[in-house]
Image (tube, rainbow, N blue to C red):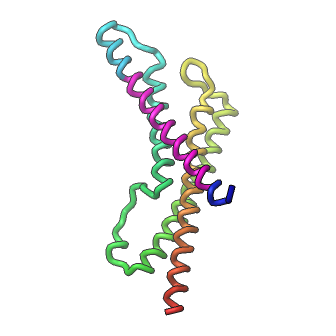
Amino acid sequence: MSINALIQTLDRVGRTLEDALLIGLLGLMIVLASSQIIFRNALDFGFVWGDELLRILVLWVAMTGAVAASRTDRHIMIDVFSRFLPGRINSALKVVTDMFTSLVCGFAAWYSWTFVAMEMEFGSSILGGLPAWPFQMVLPVSFGLIAWRYLLHGVKDAAAVMNVGQEEQKS
């Protein structure tokens, strides 16, 4: 198996896992929220831990969705300059923004890991006594994956800018 085939296979597996995790988490949120509403209104009871778990699931869906959006560079961005700048300058600006995004997400990954480590140290608990840190690990992992992906986007975009520059010099 060639290195390109291996990379494509790993990418496909990663995308499938991300999509499956998103679908599973969102499905669980819908079922839990619906059952909480039905149980409270029709049967006068609900799960004590239900609202807390829903808040955790919202965090997980948001972070998993952000990771999935980063795989195709589909994050929300302010795109003012790209409409007015010429092609090569616009491409160079894209490299800068990709690298900046990677740097910011790298810092967010580092500091969210610091937060999770403190939660481990202090023994914080949620959902009736479960340790909080495993549920919070989505933060450093997600920010780390986003940082990695935007670093790769930046390198790919930089290679494209350099390639365009070489082609212009040959002409």
**Picture quarter with the N terminus:** bottom right
Q: Is residue 116 above or below residue 48?
A: below
Q: Which residue occupies the foreground of this view, 24 or 12?
A: 12
Please report the residue visible at 56 percent of the width from the left and 74 percent of the height from the top. 159
Q: Main secondary structure of the magenta part?
A: helix
Please report the residue visible at 51 percent of the width from the left and 48 percent of the height from the top. 67
Relative side of 31 to 161, left or right? left
Q: Which residue occupies the foreground of this view, 129 or 24?
A: 24
Q: Is 63 one of the magenta-colored residues? A: no
Q: Which residue occupies the foreground of this view, 158 or 77?
A: 158
Q: Is residue 52 above or below residue 39?
A: below
The residue most toward the front is 1
Q: Which residues are magenta?
A: 7-33
Measuring from the top left, give residue 111's x and y in whole percent.
61, 48
Whether residue 126 is visible here, answered yes or no, is: yes
Q: Is residue 164 above or below residue 105?
A: below
Please report the residue visible at 48 percent of the width from the left and 19 percent of the height from the top. 49
Measuring from the top left, give residue 89's x and y in whole percent.
44, 79
Measuring from the top left, give residue 114's x and y in whole percent.
65, 44
Please report the residue visible at 40 percent of the width from the left and 23 percent of the height from the top. 31
Whether residue 106 is visible here, answered yes or no, is: no
The residue most toward the top is 43
How many tags in the picture? 0
Q: Is 29 one of the magenta-colored residues? A: yes
Measuring from the top left, give residue 73's x and y in whole percent.
46, 58
Rendered image quadrant of residue 132: top right
